[in-house]
């Protein structure tokens, strides 16, 4: 059964599921989402609701953070091998406390509106030692990066902490939650 | 050596041309054509621009990560032997990653608040573009394989195109 068929079948149930990425054999939960929304994203429909757009984009931002942080970890590992100072990863907010699913009624407002503005750290920020043995070398980071890019994603049970829809890859298995 | 220089020159020319073309030709192609249930105060265009910025930032991030993996693979395969050149590549990529993370911070605000952060994302995107230009300026001289040079040039072109789309959506 293709991913599209799985999503279509699950979409008919209109239930909540949690998305996750498999990183080094571990399932990392990404968030919950309406399967209907996933199907619409997976099927590249032209129309979506505002709340689903926000949820989808939120997951995409999480994926971007994962990729960038994996890159920085791998780069720090390489720099450490050469005896160079590592670069500091910038916290993009991915370690924030869990957020509730975003539900916005028409004419309503985004619950994230009240969040404090985040101040990005300039690119030339001072560096600190941030590498570790686990981060050194390119092996772990590419795996995380490839997974986050959608090549090895999975849909798992309701354990996520971010309301989100994944940027589903073509080989995404799906498991319906209870 | 002469051959390598020619490949380098053509590769950089290709990237530069792509950069210019993407700035002028790429429109703000929205991923989602219609967004329903828009709350009060959010326009269709705001939602589309926001989605476009997120989508293309994701492309930039994926391409940057692929680029980083390619550079490390080249190093591990003995195709980049100059330490200084290797470090400069890594540092350039890390700056792009940092700018991506900074952009994510701004984009965590939803579309109706995105208007205020657009300028910041635009600035970060322009800085990423600047980092690509620096990587181009450094060239692929330190890469010994012609195929690898082409691969690296193509990746830079891909990142440049995605950056241009973000710039288009935020300017």
Image (cartoon, helix red, strand yellow):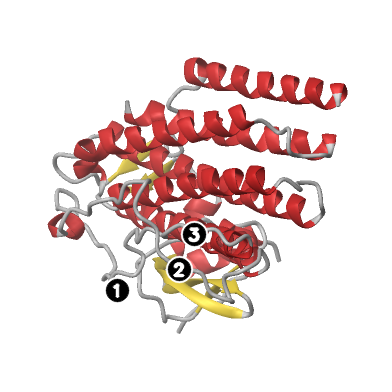
Q: Which residue is mark 2?
A: A130
Q: Which mark is residue A65?
A: none
Label 1 in the same subunit as label 2: yes
Secondary structure of residue under mark 3: loop
Where in the figure is residue B147, as x and y percent of width and height?
Answer: 83, 37
Q: Earlier in the sequence, mark 2 or mark 3?
A: 3
* Quadrant housing residue A32: bottom left
Figure check: A76 above or below B9: below
Query: Is residue B130 found left or right of A134 in the rendered image?
Result: left
Judge the density around disc 2: few (<14), some (14-19), many (≥20) Cα neighbours within 10 Å.
Answer: some
Q: Quadrant of residue A98?
A: bottom left
Question: Tag 1: Cα neighbours inside 10 Å, few (<14), some, or many (≥20)?
Answer: few
| Mark 3 crowd level (few <14, some 14–19, many ≥20, 10 Å Cα) | some
Residue B17 lies in what quarter of the image?
top right
Quarter that holds the C terminus of chain A: bottom left
Badge 2 element: loop
The first of marks 1 and 2 along the sequence is 1
Q: In the rendered image, which quarter contains the N terminus of chain A?
A: bottom right
Tell me, for residue A98, which label it has, or none.
1
The first of marks 3 and 1 along the sequence is 3
Residue at 34% across, 70% down: A95
Q: How far apart are labels 2 and 3 at the CA level?
A: 9 Å
């Amino acid at each position: 059964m293709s991913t599209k068929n799985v999503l279509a079948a699950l979409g008919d149930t209109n239930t909540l599921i949690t998305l996750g990425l498999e990183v080094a054999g571990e399932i990392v939960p990404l968030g919950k989402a309406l399967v209907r929304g996933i199907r619409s994203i997976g099927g590249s429909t032209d129309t979506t609701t505002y709340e689903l757009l926000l949820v989808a984009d939120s997951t995409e931002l999480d994926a971007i953070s994962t990729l960038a942080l994996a890159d920085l970890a791998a780069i720090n590992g390489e720099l450490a091998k050469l005896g160079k100072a590592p670069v500091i990863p910038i916290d993009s907010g991915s370690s924030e406390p869990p957020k509730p699913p975003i539900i916005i009624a028409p004419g309503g407002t985004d619950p994230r509106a009240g969040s404090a503005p985040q101040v990005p750290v300039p690119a030339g920020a001072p560096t600190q030692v941030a590498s570790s043995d686990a981060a050194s070398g390119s092996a772990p980071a590419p795996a995380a990066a490839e997974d986050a890019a959608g090549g090895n994603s999975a849909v798992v049970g309701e354990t996520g902490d971010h309301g989100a829809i994944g940027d589903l890859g073509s080989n995404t298995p799906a498991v319906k939650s209870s | 050596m002469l051959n390598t220089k020619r490949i380098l020159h053509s590769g950089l020319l290709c990237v530069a041309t792509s950069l210019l073309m993407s700035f002028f030709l790429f429109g703000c192609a929205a991923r989602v054509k219609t967004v329903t249930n828009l709350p009060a105060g959010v326009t269709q265009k705001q939602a589309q621009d926001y989605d476009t910025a997120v989508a293309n930032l994701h492309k930039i991030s994926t391409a940057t990560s692929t680029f980083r993996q390619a550079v490390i693979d080249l190093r591990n395969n003995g195709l980049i032997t100059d330490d200084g050149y290797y470090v400069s590549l890594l540092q350039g990529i890390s700056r792009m990653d940092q700018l991506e993370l900074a952009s994510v911070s701004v984009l965590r605000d939803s579309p109706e608040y995105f208007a205020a952060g657009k300028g910041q994302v635009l600035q970060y995107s322009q800085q990423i573009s600047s980092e690509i230009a620096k990587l181009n300026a450094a060239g692929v001289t330190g890469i010994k394989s012609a195929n690898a040079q082409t691969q690296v040039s193509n990746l830079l072109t891909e990142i440049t195109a995605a950056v241009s789309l973000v710039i288009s959506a935020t300017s």
